[in-house]
Image (cartoon, helix red, strand yellow):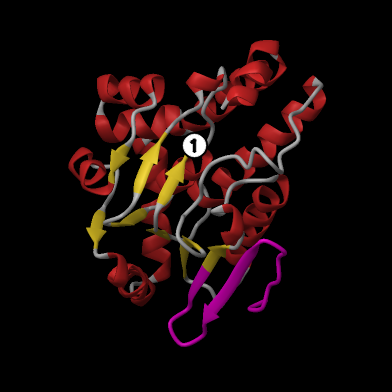
């Protein structure tokens, strides 16, 4: 199960260390999210979690960005509740695979991490940001809602007041600012990003897997006890946003 192929995600295993690197691979669109990328990432993480040869994951983006949010040129706006729910559940599936999966995920966040891309960065256990990295949540300004469990994860990291600021006002933050807030675990020079991510992943891979996976499971369960509830509530709020005509107008203007 060591070799996997997906149209929009590259999956490469270092067989010696057990570190698998997953690379969002739509660089011509700044790795912006379309349905294919959403589904491919969920499958890629699920397959890696089930692969005995994989001990740790690295998640990064090809080219100059990690993930620039929704791809407005290749993203079909759902026109029915059924279609909206199917799309949102697909997004939440990727988060569930990363957050509730047994294997640690090291983020190598290069360039922009916007909206759902910022959510994926928050879903990583050890998010390492390049100095050029930037992140923000535009959802509320578009009459939409966040996903990825960030309504539980972000307040746990930055506190409720700062979380409200980040989610409601959609301000843009540098990697250094995110490190000060506790959102970025480390910030490194752009040229050192993948080397630092690999070094961290190898450290994790060298630890006893039983203890590592138990630690991840317990920390997730205790530190974000309402994560499942947050995912469910986010889904309902996002579906409602998709179906509001005001959202279509704002997306067109954006």
Q: Position of residue 193 (x, y in %)?
A: 32, 67
Q: Position of residue 79 (x, y in %)?
A: 80, 23
* Left or right placement of residue 76 versus residue 146 in this view: right
Furthest-left residue in view?
180
Give the residue at x 44% y 46%.
Answer: 113
Q: Nearer the viewer, residue 198 or 206?
A: 198
Q: How many discs mark residues in the rendered view?
A: 1
* Left or right placement of residue 163 versus residue 246 in this view: left
Give the residue at x 51% y 50%.
Answer: 67
Q: Nearer the viewer, residue 102 or 47?
A: 47
Residue indicated by mark 1: 115
Whether residue 148 is in magenta: the answer is no
- Under tag 1, what secondary structure? loop
Start-end of magenta stretch? 1-21
Q: Is residue 125 above or below residue 198?
A: above
Q: Quadrant of residue 145?
A: top right
* Left or right placement of residue 32 versus residue 155 in this view: right
Whether residue 17 is in magenta: the answer is yes
Give the residue at x 18% y 42%.
Answer: 180
Q: Position of residue 53 (x, y in %)?
A: 56, 78
Q: Position of residue 52 (x, y in %)?
A: 58, 74
Give the residue at x 63% y 40%.
Answer: 91
On-image quarter of the N terminus: bottom right
* Left or right placement of residue 45 versus residue 204 in this view: right
Q: Nearer the viewer, residue 172 or 54?
A: 172
Q: Is residue 213 above or below residue 135?
A: below
Q: Is residue 205 above or below residue 187?
A: below
Res 52 visible: no
Res 186 visible: yes
Furthest-front residue in view?
253
Crowdedness near tag 1: few (<14), some (14–19) or many (≥20) residues, C-alpha within 10 Å: many
On-image quarter of the C terminus: top right
């Amino acid at each position: 199960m060591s070799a996997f192929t997906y149209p929009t995600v590259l999956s490469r295993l270092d067989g010696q260390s057990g570190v698998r690197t997953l690379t969002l691979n739509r660089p011509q669109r700044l790795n912006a999210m379309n349905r294919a990328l959403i589904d491919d990432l969920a499958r890629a993480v699920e397959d890696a979690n089930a692969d005995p040869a994989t001990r740790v994951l690295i998640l990064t983006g090809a080219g100059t960005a990690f993930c620039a949010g929704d791809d407005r040129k290749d993203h079909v706006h759902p026109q029915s509740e059924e279609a909206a729910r199917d799309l949102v559940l697909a997004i939440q599936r990727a988060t569930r695979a990363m957050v509730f999966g047994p294997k640690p995920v090291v983020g190598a966040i290069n360039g922009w991490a916007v909206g759902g891309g910022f959510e994926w960065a928050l879903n990583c256990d050890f998010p390492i940001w390049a100095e050029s990295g930037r992140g923000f949540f535009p959802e509320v300004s578009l009459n939409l809602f966040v996903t990825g469990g960030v309504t539980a994860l972000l307040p746990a990291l930055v506190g409720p007041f700062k979380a409200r600021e980040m989610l409601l006002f959609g301000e843009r933050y540098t990697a250094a600012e995110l490190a000060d807030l506790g959102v970025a675990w480390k910030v490194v020079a752009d040229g050192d990003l993948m080397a630092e991510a690999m070094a961290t992943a190898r450290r994790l891979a060298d630890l006893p897997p039983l203890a590592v996976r138990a630690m991840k499971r317990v920390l997730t369960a205790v530190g974000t006890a309402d994560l499942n509830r947050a995912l469910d509530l986010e889904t309902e709020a996002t579906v409602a946003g998709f179906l509001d005509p005001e959202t279509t107008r704002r997306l067109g203007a954006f």
